[in-house]
Amino acid sequence: PGINWTAPLFTTDDCSGIERYTIGIESCNFGDVYSSEIPFYLNVDEDSELELIGMSYSRITNKTSFYAFNLDGSNVSGFPKKFDERLFCLSQGKFRDENEILCIKLESADVYSIVLINKDFNLHKIGEINLSKYSSRASLYGLNYGEFRGNKYYVWTIRDHGNYKNHWIFMNENGTIYRDNSRSLLYNKEFYSIGNFNGDNYVLLGNGYKGDAYFGNLDGNEIMFSHSNYMENAIISDIDNDNLNELITSDRSGKLYVRDLNGSIENEQGEFF
């Protein structure tokens, strides 16, 4: 609030979603430049404050550009920085013991890799995945990062459109695939959240035919929670301060579900509102 931007940030349009990026930027006719949908924050200069980072990709120049702004809206010296890479940056967090931006790089039509960008804007490639291994009609639907059984993994979510199946694939921090799990699912989400169920982390897999929402862990074990309709949102948090997480979901019927996750996990728990 109150910030007067002294230069354009980056163009946003209907090409900014990962679902369009997956099918190829050339097939998007809404503009020649697209951007990440969220800003990032890194300390990229000599002061002690974080700077606002935005990115854009131009299919005219085939370059990805990163812009940096001070919190008063002024430009940071040395920016924009341009790379001959096709990147889609998703989030930021602490990777390799420092704050970095997590990006997906399109290596070829079916091959994607993970790229981490630090405050010095060094690009570090982690590993890659080939969608054609899973289906001739596969799309990348999500990438997440979290701790499972004491180790940290990148979790890819890949959609097999031909067989209505989702794969959730665990990749080590060194870029090797640790485990590939899958299940048949009708509906999908754009964001596949990770949450803790009784000390074991699970990732949201998607929705089934009758509003059944599935979560899966590192071993491929699944938990299903029923809804009267397609599940729209899922939040895992301790909302009653009992040191135990609850699962809060809503569906297309407008119902809100709160489930207590203490004790043994079953298909149905808690109160329905």
Image: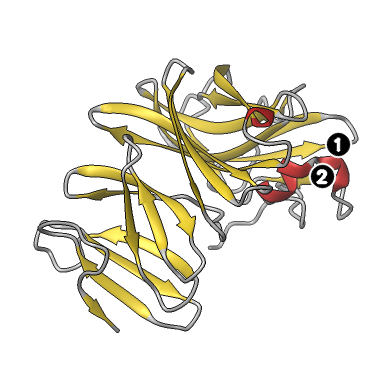
Quadrant (top left, top right, bottom left, bottom right) of the C terminus: bottom left
Quadrant of the rendered image containing residue 55: top right
- Local crowd at mark 1 within 10 Å, few (<14), some, or many (≥20)? some
Tell which of 228 and 104 is nearer to you. Answer: 228
Q: Is residue 13 visible?
A: yes
Say above or below: 111 vs 189: above
Say above or below: 264 vs 256: above
Tell which of 73 and 106 is nearer to you. Answer: 106
Q: Which residue is at a point 47% across and 71% down the rendered structure image? A: 210
> What is the x, y in percent for residue 138?
68, 40
Quadrant of the rendered image containing residue 79: top right
Q: Is residue 51 visible?
A: no
> What is the x, y in percent for residue 111?
68, 26
Left or right of 76, for residue 118 = left
Q: Which residue is at a point 19% across and 57% down the rendered structure image? A: 265
Count of labels in the image: 2
In whole angstroms, how far apart are the C-alphas of marks 2 and 1?
A: 7 Å
Q: Which residue is at a point 47% across and 50% down the rendered structure image? A: 192
> What is the x, y in percent for residue 241?
12, 64
- What is the number of the mark on residue 17? none
Label 2 element class: strand
- What is the number of the mark on residue 59? 1
Amino acid, disc 2: Val
- Local crowd at mark 2 within 10 Å, few (<14), some, or many (≥20)? many
- What is the number of the mark on residue 33? 2
Amino acid, disc 1: Arg
Label 1 element class: loop
Left or right of 140, for residue 59 = right
Is the residue under label 1 in contact with that under label 2 (CB below 8 Å)?
Answer: yes
Q: Of the residues under marks 2 and 1, which one precedes in the sequence? A: 2
